[in-house]
Amino acid sequence: MDRLLNVTTVLSILLLIMVLISVRRAHIRVEYSVSWLLTSLAMLLLSRSRPVLELITRWSGVPDTPLTLFLISGALFLVMFFRFSVIISHLRADNVARAQRVAFLEYHIHSIEQHE
């Protein structure tokens, strides 16, 4: 169990460092990095506070503490992926609306040029 918690700690720290470097180099926008930062911090805290993890295991009825850790991490990442799917959907809809506006403006410019 301690080995798994240590591995989770290292992976959480690596994810945290990667996100911070990506924000610093402008590879990821700050508002999108918040989810990654919160998730990596949550995993870091859970991997370092074994009593809290064991309490969650007892409360949830999951038979094993490592399984609880993986279930929590999986749930966190599923929530993040859903959030990013919503963001991508909004961006796609915005792109379609902008493309339609550009096409409309091009049509008007073309019709004005023909009348001159």
Image (tube, rainbow, N blue to C red):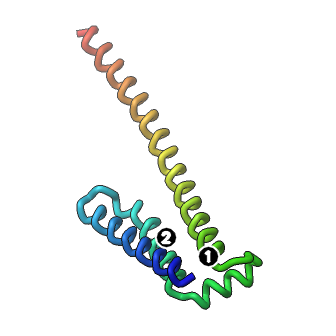
In depth, the one of 97 and 6 nearer the eye is: 6
For residue 5, which numbered disc appears in the image?
A: none
Give above or below for 97 relative to 22: above
Q: Residue at x 65, y 74 (%)?
A: 68
Distance in Å between CA atoms under marks 2 and 1: 17 Å
Q: Residue at x 56, y 68 (%)?
A: 73
Give above or below for 60 relative to 89: below
Q: Residue at x 47, y 72 (%)?
A: 38
Identify the element where label 1 is drawn: helix
Bin the neighbour count of mark 1 within 10 Å (Cα to Cα): few under 14, some 14-19, many 20 and up: some
Of marks 2 and 1, the one in the foreground: 1
Q: Position of residue 49 (x, y in %)?
A: 54, 88
The amino acid beneath tag 2 is Thr
The amino acid beneath tag 1 is Pro
In the rendered view, does 110 fall on the left or right side of 56? left
Picture quarter with the C terminus:
top left
